[in-house]
Image: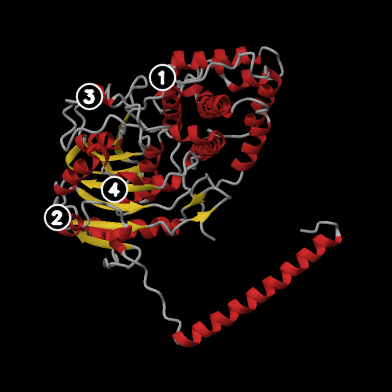
Amino acid sequence: MAKNNNGANLGFERELWQAADALRSNMDAAEYKHVVLGLIFLKYISDAFEEQHAKLDAERAQGADPEDPDEYRAVNIFWVPKEARWSVLKAGAKQPTVGKTVDEAMLAIERDNPSLKGVLPKDYAHPRLDKQRLGQLIDLIGNLMLGSKENRSRDILGRAFEYFLSQFASAEGKKGGQFYTPRCIVRVLVEMLSPYKGRVYDPCCGSGGMFVQSVEFVKAHTSGNGNGGKAKADVSVFGQESNHTTWRLAKMNLAIRQIENNIGKEHADSFHQDLHPDLKADYVLANPPFNDSDWRGEMLKEDKRWKYGIPPVGNANYAWVQHFIHHLAPTGMAGFVLANGSMSSNQSGEGEIRKNIIEADIVDCMVAMPGQLFYSTQIPVCLWFIARDKKNGRFRDRRGQTLFIDARKLGTLIDRVHRDLTDEDIGKIADTYHAWRGKSSPLAGEGQAEYQDIPGFCKSATLDGIRHHGHILTPGRYVGAAAVENDGEPFEEKMARLTADLRGQMEESAKLDKLIWANLEDIGYVF
């Protein structure tokens, strides 16, 4: 059975979501998300704290002090002051003052853990939040052991947190895309770029999914991964997020995963307040807002980032593309999501900017994705892959070449409006790119397939070929049509059979039409 990649696949997370959602009542999903995720986060750090507290308590004879905050910080566990411990919340869950108790707990944790300052939600005492339902939610979450050492190693909470993010994104519809990129899309980007080590940058990081998957990628490839076989990711995380509430989600998401990061001390707009102006990243992974017309581009006409042309004020797509390129190291690589229009638009100078980027020979690969992958939009999307240096020694010399992949036929509908990519789909896309790109010998592993063009799916095109198509990057223009398998039936015989089938179906249709009209006449409807 193909594995679904948009959820956590834990088994209990769906039941937990259904129970938590039932307690939402009439509260808007955008507000309720912070109520639930804040409590889940608090339960996680409380479990980790209590486990370490018990260990230190048992070691008092050796001089351990279970009430010394440094004993926890030394092992990368958040210090939880007495008034913020889960036992206090549980004891007060049935009290009308439970909202005030939770708010005070969140304030105390932020006070004693500077890295969480300004991150945790503190609106539990607000009148619009039903206190009886809040108490029930505390009891529900309290039945889970989320932060024990075993569950931390299995990343139980991190995966449950991600599942809840995906469900809230679905519930919020269009607005949900501001904080969540479907897991399968992130996995395609990460699997293709393979960020084993170095500086990873996402200037529109949402809830931090690109960073989480980069670290997960390294853990999943601990053998022959270019990281000395280490499961601990040797990556440095840099980024920022312009939306304050989404930035808080990212800080919690990364804290749960114990991923050290530099995504700023507050939310900030990457175009107008670049928090990392001098950063040159080894990898850029991003899903910027599509076709953003409200990016205040008129204030940045002379910006140094616009090396390939001034992006139009009415659409930020090529501002993002050039921002990504600007922040790449000399041998850096970028993978990012954009609306399909970015591959062919000639409006407001976008075609000229795209032409200049193509002529600089830094477009490494283009992937057309299936529709219905996003919760927030039905706009078809594509993946861009940029390589600052196609002859950098890590892979084969790809100068003058670009790979086009048409993946629109991949994926499986998981409900009426959402599609997902299976592990096999993701592997097919990533393996095609790796085979085309080639790998440096010590890390390549054995048995990598040799690249071949596949009609209807992938094509390695030359720069001259792209010029011939007017610098349009739509994969469908290059990959051609898939070969149709010959079933061995002669054409004349097939046409005779199909014509006979059609005649029979039309005769049957005529009979059904007569029957329907007769039934209508019987009940008094005569036309």
Give the amino acid at mark 1.
Asp
Residue 292 visible in the snapshot: yes
Q: Which residue is mark 2?
A: 399
| Callout in the foreground (1, 3) | 3
Residue 505, percent from left and from top: 64, 75
| Residue drawn where x is 43% and y is 40% of the image | 181
The quarter of the image holding the C terminus is: bottom right
- Quarter of the N terminus within the rendering: bottom right
State how far apart marks 1 and 2 are (Cα).
53 Å
> Which mark is on residue 300?
3
Residue contact between numbered discs 4 and 3, judged by CB atoms under 8 Å: no
Residue under label 4: 344
Residue that badge 1 annotates: 70
Given residues 127 and 520, the one toward you in this image is: 520
- Name the front one of labels 3 and 2: 3
Q: Quadrant of residue 19?
A: top right
- Mark 1 and mark 2 lie on one chain; the one further toward the N terminus is 1
Q: Is residue 396 left or right of residue 272?
A: left
Q: Position of residue 202 (x, y in %)?
A: 32, 34
Name the front one of labels 1 and 2: 2
- The three-letter amino acid code for the residue at tag 2 is Arg
Q: Residues within 10 Å of mark 2 (few under 14, many from 20)?
A: some
Q: CA distance from mark 4 to mark 3?
A: 24 Å
SS at circle 1: helix
Q: Residue at x 63, y 37 (%)?
A: 16
Where disc 4 sits, the SS reads loop
Q: Marks 3 and 2, how far apart in space?
A: 32 Å
